[in-house]
Each structure stands twice: as structure tokens, then as C-alpha cells.
Image: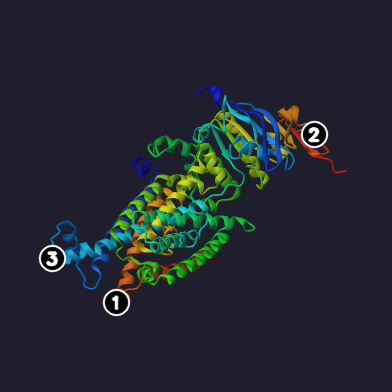
Amino acid sequence: MNASSNDLTVRDVTVAYGQTEVVRKLSIDIPQHQLTALVGPNGCGKSTLLKAIARVLPIQSGQVLLGSAPVHTMPTRQVASILGFLPQGPIAPEGLSVRELVAQGRFPHQSLMRQWSSADARAVDQAMAATNIADFADRPIDHLSGGERQRAWIAMVLAQDTPILLLDEPTTFLDLKVQVDIMRLLQRITHDASKTILIVMHELNIAAAFADHLIMMRAGRVRASGDVLSVFTERNLSAVFDLDARVLTSPENGRPVCIPSVA
Amino acid sequence: MQTMADAREHPGHWSTGIAGLICLCVLAVAFLWHISVGAKEIPFAVIVEALFTYNRDQFDHIVVHEIRLPRALMAVFVGAGLAVAGALMQGVTRNPLADPGLLGLMAGATFAVVVASLFSVPDFSMIPLIAAAGALIAAVFVWLVASAVRGGATPMSMVLAGAAMSAFLGALTTALLLIDQQSFEQLRVWMTGTLTVRPRGIALWSYGWLCVGLLIALAIARQVTTLAMGDETATGLGVNIRRLRIAVLSAVVLLTAASVSLVGPMGFVGLVTPHFVRLIVGFDYRWVIPGSALAGAVFLLLTDIVARTVLAPVEISTGLVTAFIGAPVLVWLVKTRL
């Protein structure tokens, strides 16, 4: 596998539910080895785009490319060795333990002929260590708190050991502290393991504080894309979200922070 | 299947391995017990003799070979097949009430076999395939009806659609049999689920298809776990969902059709067994599938022992016993799992 096959690009992609086009002729490059946050108002098509990239949804036209290979026609198991995907609000079968869940991430590396190996066990242990869930490896998923459960799911896609990860709203419905923990974790994974991570999320300030790259979508199109400082501006917030807000610089880390006007 | 590496890396799985061994021992004991029980009790030692050093001058050996062994084998294969069919259906549809009987597949297969008997299909090899066609058509109809309901194919809508389908096909089957009294006499007992000897051709083909269905189930067991985590997660992990669904449907239809061809509609084995197995081995289908096969075989052996002994010398239908055990479990599942 050469390095270029890990380049993720979206070319003129249109996705529709029935007659309604949710994503329209959209093109973006996902920068390698960076944490990219995809934001936009509700219904802008950001989750739809992520699912289309992950080949969970079919596309009407255009192409999602890994290097020069189109994701939607590649053998799905081969895609799964390059691209990991965590859906929004994933379901765990009742009673499955954390370790068993994380072990499912090894699926694309196994076959009838090649069963569980020590490499699989190592990947599972590493993923659990990186997400700090090794202590409750043998507990059932349904007994964990929301944040712990989300870390277990992230460990599952980490165990898949892919250069690219797509996460659909991994922080939604979690406490602020837990959101920050998850984003720190993703930031660490991006830079320590040099992964390319694309996440869909809602919380603008959290995105601005942790992402390297920001993509703003509205009505099925990309409205702004670039590094956080250049994209997270009062003008873009107004144009994309209809949000009247001031953007300040955080004294913590020099990242932008938006404060909605209340007048 | 468990490999040495797996056992090393997953110390927890040793317990599963031991449980598997215990299960095999339980199966062996249940098998011998099943053969020994009857009008004349045959000691275990004589059964083992009859199995390994057959002597055709000994009356007991002949009884074991000609009557009791075929019936015990039938219980083992049908029990395993129905339990695995139920486990596959419950895993893939994420529906704790999925079962070949409750979702109408058995009624479809039964109806098809009755129609085939009325038109006296001469070729026994065709019977399991005709049953499979019936099961498949019933399954597709139940799924279509359940999906058309507001709210989609939920566990409840599927069970209701299955009940409607079973009632409808049951009525048709009865009507057909009333027209033809002779077939009615032949099939009346079969239709309540009994482990009596079937024509040799039907039996051989049914066993063959049961083996095919069980092998498919074992081959796809690992993928069933991922599908139980939702279509999106499974796709992300590289599972070809469409192909897997077709494999699951083929296995379920083959197992149901072959079982019905052998013993008639035997309800609740597929519903009860996988729940029991998951209590022991957890949710990984690499264990649930072989575990269900073993547990289903034991379950049907034991219920058949009850059916043969509880009102001795009269024998009652095994299907009545499985229903007697299964119905309360169904109520419990509805109360706790829906």
C-alpha cells in the first residue's frame, strides 16, 4: 500500500434521499494527519456526507477516492483496512463486554482461514490503553457511563488500525468535561499515531479549540474550509449558521472562541 | 472456532472451552439416555455395544439400530438446526422474538409439504426443496407485511405478521387436508411435530440440507456479531451486508425446511435455545452458533424423552412438549426483552 492510497478526496459528490438532494456536487480534500471537524447547521448534510464517504450511503454522482481508487466500488473489506467509521449512537448487543466490542474492530484483518492472532490481541490491548478503558475491559458495555461507552467505541475503530478515521458526532449528548476528554483523545491519536481523522460535530467552540482543520457546510455545500483561525470568523458564523456572534481569542491556547450576542 | 492463540490471548475463553466440553458430555449422556428409554429399557452398556460391536442376533441391538438410533439422530439434527436458525434470525434482525415458527417460516414449509403430498410428488429429494420454497415465500411475505406497518419491521410487528401468516397458512393446510382424507390420516401426526420415521429418501435429503445449513451458519457466525451492532457499524468494519443477509436467509430457510420435512412444525426450539445459550456464552456468535447447535440437540432429546415417557405407554407429540416449555419462555421474553 503506497502513501497516496491514504489520500481521501471527495469529487463532485451528490447524495440524495429520494428526490431530495442533501449533498450537492461537493468536493473537498481531507488533509492527511490532521484532525478535521465538519460543522454546519442541522440538516446541512454533514452526517450524510460522512456516511457517503464511509460507503454506508450510496452516492448519486461523483466519487469518493482513496488515492485513485473509488471507495464505492472497491471491495468493502479492503476499504475497511484503510477507513474506519464510527456511526452516530451505535448499538451494542446487550451483554457484550468492552473487550469483545473492541475485538470486533479486528474484523477486516481476519478471515475463515486467518483466525484471531497475537497481532489482533496486541491491537486490541493498545486501543484499550490509548482510550484508557483497560480497567473495565471485562464489563458489559451497557453498564458503562456515556463517556466510557464512547471511549470503548472509539477503541473499536482504533483496533481496526486504519490510517483514516471517520466519526459521526462522537461528542453529542455528553457532558462538557467528557466532550473535552474525547477531543483531547482524538487530538492525541491524530498526532501521536499520525492518523487522519474527520469528525462531524455540533459544538463550535469545542471544534475550534481542538481541530486542526475546519470545514463548514450549509445546504449541502461547503461554505468554508481551511485552518481553524482562517475559517472560524464572525463573517462565516453569520453566513453559515445565521449566528450573530463575536469571536474572541482564548487566553488558554490562542484558539478562537465564539460568544453569541444576547442583545 | 477456538484456536490455541485465541485461548491464550483471551483467558476468559477457557471457560467457554470447558463449557463446550461439558456440553458435549451432556449431549452424549442425553443421547444414550434417549436411546435407553422406551417400552423396554436398554442399559447404556448394551447401547454402546450395539453402536460399536453390532450383533444382529441380539434383539436389543436390533431395537437400537432400527428404531431408537434413527429417532435420537433425528432429535439431534433437528434440534441443532432449529436452534441455529433461531440464533441467526435473532442476531441479524436484532429481534429477541425471532424464531422460524413465530415468524411464519414453519407454516410456509408445512403448507408446501402438504401441497406436495396431495399432488403426490414422487421424488422424495424434492420435498425439502419444496418446503424451502414455502418457508422462503412465507418469510418474504411476513417481512413485507411487517415493513408496511407504521413504525416499520419492529420485533412486535414481525411477530404479529408471522402470527397472521401462520394462522392463514394453517387454515389453508387444514382445508386441503379435509378435502383429502387419506393424506390427512398420513400427515395428521406429522403436523403436530413428531420424531417418527419418515420415508428414507426424505430423511436422507433432509439430513444433507441440515448439514449444509449448519455449515453455512458456522462459516458466517463471526459476521453475524458485527451485523448485530447495526448496519452502519458492520459496513464500516468491511462486512458485505447484502451478501451476508442472503447467506443468513439461505441457512435459515434450509434449516427450517429440512427440519419440517423430517418432523413437521416443531415450535419454540429456535426461540428458547439461543436465549439460554447467550446467558452462558455471551453475545459473540462464534460461540452462540455452535452453542445453540449443541444446546438445541440436547433440548430436543430431553423433550422427546418427556414426550415418550410422561404418559407411557401412550406417546404424545414432541411438538406439544416443546410448546409447553416454549410458551412460558415467550411470555417471559415479551415481559423482559421488549
Closer to the N terminus: mark 3 or mark 1? 3
Which colouring convention does the figure follow? rainbow
Residue B139 visible from this viewpoint: yes
Badge 3 density bin: few <14, some 14–19, many ≥20, Cα 10 Å? few
| Residue B72 vertical placement versus A89 (above, below) | below
Chain under disc 2 = A
Label 2 neighbourhood size at 10 Å, few (<14), some (14-19), many (20+)?
some
Residue B193, image quadrant: bottom left
Q: As rendered, which of B178 and B70 lies closer to the eye?
A: B178
- For residue A54, the mark is none
Q: Is residue B181 left or right of residue A227?
A: left
Is the C-beta separation of discs 3 and 2 under 8 Å? no
Residue depicted at x 49% and y 62%: B102
Residue corresponding to mark 1: B312
Q: Amino acid at mark 3?
A: Gln
Residue type indicated by callout 1? Ala
**Left or right of residue B185, residue A213 in this image:** right
Establish if A157 lies above or below B201. Answer: above
Count every numbered label the image shows and give the total. 3
Which residue in the protein does label 3 denote? B58
Task: Please tell me in which quadrant of the rendered image residue B297 appears.
Answer: bottom left
Q: Which mark is residue A247?
A: 2
The amino acid beneath tag 2 is Val
